[in-house]
Image: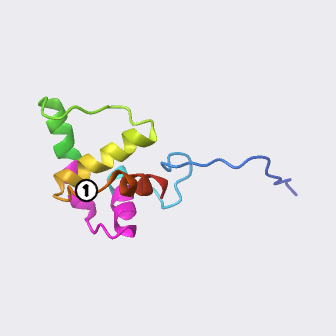
Amino acid sequence: MRNNNRTAVIFDWDLTLAQSMGNLSASNKIAVLFQTKGLHYSHDEIEQAIQTRKKLIRDGKLIAKAELQTRRDIACYYKQLLTILGHAKVSMSNLYELYTD
């Protein structure tokens, strides 16, 4: 019998290592995350917001980081998506809560 002793726990915040929700796209993961916090946007709405954000960046109408690495970067990314979706009134503390979840 194989020895299955565990020696470490890896926290995979963005679900890139362990696909715990299945093989979902980033827009699906964000939709699920937002929905758990009462922000009921569909996968299609999130995907459209992501594409709109990319276009705004390409057109020079939105300054944003391509690499989202820090808690603040990701919180700002969520804020940009929510603003595009018409949900602009969200506090940084709520955004950090999303990040933590």
Frontmost residue, 15 versus 40: 40
Which colour style is shown? Answer: rainbow
From the top left corner, tell me how far across and down residue 56 is, in percent. Answer: 15, 37
The amino acid at mark 1 is Ile
- Report if residue 25 is visible in the image: no
The foreground one among 91 and 24 is 91
Residue at 19% from the left image edge and 33% from the top image edge: 57
Q: Is residue 49 above or below residue 55?
A: below
How dense is the environment of label 1, judged by Cα within 10 Å: few (below 14), some, or many (20 and up)? many
Vertical comparison of 16 with 70: above or below: below
The part of the chain drawn in magenta is: 28-49
Number of dots carrying numbers: 1
Mark 1 secondary-structure assignment: helix
Residue 4 found in image quarter = bottom right
Residue 7 horizontal side relative to residue 31, left or right = right
Q: Is residue 10 magenta?
A: no
Q: Considering the image in quadrants, where does the N terminus appear?
A: bottom right
| Image coordinates for residue 79, horizontal then vertical, percent | 28, 49
Residue 48 % position (x, y): 19, 52
Point 50% across, 46% down: residue: 16
The quarter of the picture where residue 74 lies is top left
The secondary structure making up most of the magenta span is: helix
At 37% across and 53% down in the image, what residue appears? 95
Question: Would you say residue 54 is visible in this rendering?
Answer: yes
Is 73 left or right of 16, judged from the image as shown?
Answer: left
For mark 1, what is the residue? 46
| Residue 65 percent location from the top left of the image | 31, 31
Q: Per the image, is 35 magenta?
A: yes
Towards the viewer: 99 or 55: 99
Direction from residue 101 to residue 92 in the image, left or right: left
